[in-house]
Image (spheres, rainbow, N blue to C red):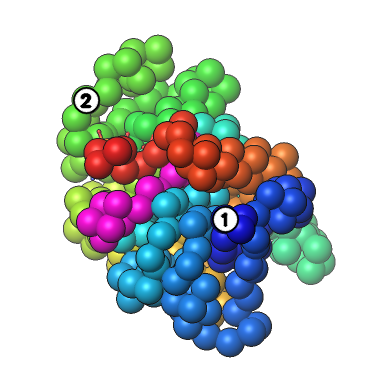
Amino acid sequence: MSKKVVVFSQIDQDVLARLKAQYQVVELNPKNGDINEQIRIEVANADAMIGAGRLLNESNLSTAKQLKIISTVSVGYDNYDLDYLNQQKIWLSNTPHVLTETTADLAFTLLVSAARKVPSLDLWTKQGNWKRTAGIEQFGQDIFGKTLGIIGLGNIGAAVARRGFYGFNMNVLYHNRREKLEMAQPLSAQYRSLEDLLGQSDFVVVAVDLNAESKSLIGADELNLMQPHAVLVNIARGSVVDEQALIEALKSRKIFAAGLDVYQQEPLSESELFKLDNVVTMPHVGSGTVATRKKMAELAYKNLVTALNDQIPQYLVNPDFV
Ligand code: NAP
């Protein structure tokens, strides 16, 4: 009897075909009813799960009897209850590195778009508003040579910083829970407290993983420290920024603009953000290019197969109990 794999979100078709050739595969689909109920039923005799973007915890995994691995097609794993997985000795693997540059590209796209009002001016132009030379209302902020503050100088944060440093001659500041000299030195990046970084940066990019300490890291007090011409970019997780406080800061022009790829509630189909002309919104597509999503799926597949062959996957998030 071949091992059972539960696919809990849409995944790459080639990877799906390969999984089907090797294992008994069950694909879950929200169109077939309550997804958590589907998980509870199918996970009972499953050996592995693969997918992204679902909350997996005791409430939907408690029926699992032989689940060895959850292979997430993402680098972030805040939607999995790690304590529960550790307690149940269920491995969790992720897909770091292969998405770093693509996600940094999107972060920089948001930075430039927000600073130069690209989406709103695109609309303005296409709506026939360009009747005389563009003026102050249409003007944005300089980027070249300005100060870029990175909150979370990890893989993606450093890749964003490289774009700023090499491409735009930016002065790079960063804040982490600890100094990251090996990441910082090649970019001449200087460590700052969160407060100093917010006060001194023209552009602030949030690139932390979501954890107990980074949740609501940026609230009204922090936004108040930013300069009125500053731009905030969040490609990390929505819950790192207090969204309502950000909306207020954008409305009252406490900051110039924001570029967002992530939100407190996703998907986001209705929001006050949509009424603001100084925010650029993207639908959580930081890693969303055809090639990168394929690389992520391949890596998640490799992690899963390795675990089902009783080997330790390359990117195991919770190796402590192995
Ligand atoms: P990473 O290499 O682990 O970097 C995360 C960095 O955040 C680490 O350097 C960590 O350093 C720092 N950090 C964590 N908590 C912090 C806090 N409270 N204050 C300051 N710094 C903190 O991860 P990555 O590959 O760069 O990915 C980062 C995150 O981006 C992922 O976890 C994911 O949530 C998000 N992401 C989003 C997309 C998208 O589509 N928008 C795509 C990929 C990733 P210390 O622990 O030393 O503080």
Residue at the extreme top of the image, as rendered: 186
Depth check, front residue: 10 or 182: 10
Name which residue type carries label 2.
Answer: Glu
| Depicted 314 relative to depicted 237: above or below | above
Mark number, residue 156: none
| Residue 87 colored in magenta in the image | yes
Between the C-alphas of marks 1 and 2, the distance is 44 Å
Name which residue type carries label 1.
Answer: Lys
| Residue 230 colored in magenta in the image | no
Depth check, front residue: 73 or 26: 26
Image point (57%, 42%), residue name? 305
Q: Quadrant of the N terminus?
A: bottom right
Image point (25%, 42%), residue name? 321
Quadrant of the rendered image containing residue 148: top left
Q: Which residue is mark 1?
A: 3
| Depicted 146 relative to depicted 198: above or below | above
Whole-percent x, y for residue 145 in the image: 47, 24
Image point (53%, 27%), residue name? 163
| Depicted 280 relative to depicted 195: above or below | below
- Range of residues picked out in magenta: 84-96
Depth check, front residue: 217 or 276: 217
Q: Which residue is mark 2?
A: 179
Q: Quadrant of the C terminus?
A: top left
Which element is circle 2 on? loop
Asked if residue 319 shows in the view, the reply is yes
Contact between marks 1 and 2 (CB within 8 A): the answer is no
Whole-percent x, y for residue 272 in the image: 47, 77
Which element is circle 1 on? loop
| Depicted 143 relative to depicted 318: above or below | above
